[in-house]
Image: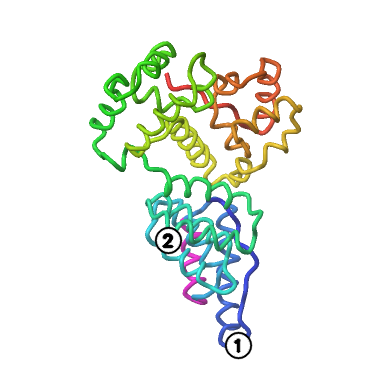
Amino acid sequence: MAHDPLDIVIGTSDAVKRDSAAAARHLTNAVKAEQTHDRGEAIGELRRAVAADPDNPQALFKLAYHLDLVGEEDEALSLYERCANRTPAHLNALMNLAVMYEDRGEYAEAERCLRQILDSSPNHLRARLYMKDVEASKGMVVVEEQDRDIFKRKAMLDTPVTDFELSVRARTCLKKMNIRTLGDLLRITEAELLSYKNFGDTSLTEIKKMLTAKGLKLGQGLEDAHRAARRALLEQYKGTGRETTLAKPVTDLQLSVRARKALQLLNIQTLGDLASHTEAELMGIKNFGATSLKEIKERLTEAGLELRKLDP
């Protein structure tokens, strides 16, 4: 959640000026403590700054930021809320608040914060990246929501596709494609099914209808893996100030036309999206070869990223 505070908005009454002057002294001391990596002293000075001026957005934000880093999440959340409720809104407080809400599973609150950011700053890269994950969390019916027991979930994914009411043609095609279980089926896309010989629209419609009845969809397993990978990257960069790297558009990589078209087919829009995919997923795209893969890997390395590796 590393973001420095935005511009300070300070009132003009005499009382506020006196409070702001005291807060400013403590803020200066806090900055000095930060420079010597004395977080305890910085937190102490920031508490005094907030006490001197309870509405100072910079003091509120920095104190919340440091408290979050030391694990005082509840107090940090309260301070971020106070900071975000000011007028004008503190965008970075809203951003960090959205992340905390999402971590707690409070997706509606996270979405509210992100929409408030995007209403005033439509091209805010980090907000756009997080909004994608929040919307996925809200909109996709995943197996965990139907059955929170991990063992039952695994049993469901291990269910043989032969247990479902499918036509002989659909079953035969799935068998030849080595799709044995429900979990296998969720890891394949519509395009991959249709590219298989003798697999047509009728069989595709049949399978999609069966999955829809269970609150599932083709490719869901891949979406889950990609989302988990993006979240892992965001967590890895937490507190480094480099989260925006993941939100940068893939056009920044200046890729060749062939590589760009391949990424468009997978709806890969950001570096975070790209880093959540595996080599095998990219190589599965028609006309995507080793040259394009090498190009993408080199550009990602330059950005300090790499393609997702399959779990062992």
Q: Secondary structure at mark 2?
A: helix
| Whether label 1 touches label 2, CB < 8 Å | no
Q: Position of residue 81 (x, y in %)?
A: 46, 66
Image height of 244 relative to 264, above or below: below
Amino acid bearing label 2? Leu
Residue at 29% across / 20% down in the picture?
Answer: 160
Q: Position of residue 304 (x, y in %)?
A: 63, 32
Left or right for 155, reference 128: left
Q: Quadrant of the C terminus?
A: top left
Q: Residues within 10 Å of mark 1 (few under 14, many from 20)?
A: few
Left or right for 32, reference 178: right
Q: Secondary structure at mark 1?
A: loop
First to last magenta residue range? 40-53
Q: Earlier in the sequence, mark 1 or mark 2?
A: 1
Prevailing SS of the magenta stretch: helix
Amino acid bearing label 1? Ser
Residue named by callout 1 = 13
Residue named by callout 2 = 77
Image height of 206 relative to 251, above or below: above
